[in-house]
Amino acid sequence: MTGSTAAPGPDPSDRDLVHRARAGDHAAFAELISRHERRVHALTYRMLGRQEDARDAAQEAFLACYRNLDRFREDAAFSTWLHRIAVNACYDILRRRGREPVPHEVLPEPPPAGDPGDRMAAAVDVQRALLAVAPEFRAVLVLHDAQGIPVDEVAAALGIPVGTVKSRLHRGRVALGRILAGEPRAAPSASNPTSPLERR
C-alpha cells in the first residue's frame, strides 16, 4: 500500500510572509520579492523610462522594504506600502538626474505604419509621452491606468487624499492626450512633486 501524499496547502499571504521575514526567515522575504518584482519593475520603468534606472529604483525599493519591514503597519496591503516605497525610489532618481528628458534612443523605435507591430508602436508612443508628463501626474497614471490599482489604494500608496488622486488623474490624462497629439505639455507641476513621500 502506497502512502498518500498530502495536498499542498494554500500559498501564504503577504502578511504571513512579512511576519516570517520579520522573524528572520530570509526565504519568506525572497518569496515577497518574487511575488511583486515584476509589477514593481513595470512601475519603475514606466516612471523612469530607462531600464538601468528602473532596475536601480526597484533594487532600492526592495532594500528599503527589507530595512523598514518593522515599520510596515498592517492597516494597508503590503503591496500598497511597497508601491509607495517604489515611487519614492523613482522620485529620488528623478531628483538626482535633474529631470533631464529621456533621450529618444532609450526607447525602441516603433515599426513603420501598417506594420504588424502597430500595437507595439502605440505602446512605445504612449511611454514616450508619459515621460513628458510631470512626475506627480505620471505616478497616478502609472498606478491607476497602467497597473489597475483602485483610486483609494493609489491615494494610500502616495500618501495623498483621494480627491487629489482624481484631480491628478484628470490633469495627467489631459496632458498625456495633448502630448500624444503633438501639443506642448500643458499640465503644471504640483508644488513639490519630487520630494520623498512620507514612508509608512
Image (tube, helix red, strand yellow):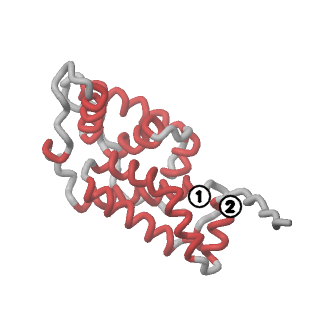
Mark 2 residue type: Pro
Question: Is 146 displayed left or right of 12 in the figure?
Answer: left
Residue receiving disc 1: 78
Label 2 vs 1, first from the N-terminus: 2
Q: Would you call the spot at circle 1 few (<14 residues within 10 Å), some (14-19), or many (20 or more)?
A: many
Q: Which quadrant, please, contains the C terminus? A: bottom right
Residue for point 67% across, 57% down: 75
Question: Which residue is outermost to the top?
Answer: 114
Residue in the image at 24% along x and 37% along y:
128
Q: Is residue 164 visible?
A: no
From where the camera sits, is residue 106 visible?
yes
Whether tag 2 and tag 1 are in contact, CB under 8 A, the answer is: no
* Looking at the image, residue 87 lies above or below residue 68: above
- Percent position (x, y) of residue 101? 17, 46
Marks 2, 1: nearer the viewer:
2
Quadrant housing residue 96: bottom left
Q: Residue at x 49, y 67 (%)?
A: 65
Query: Residue at the location (31% across, 63% down)?
Result: 56
Q: Which residue is identified by label 2?
A: 12
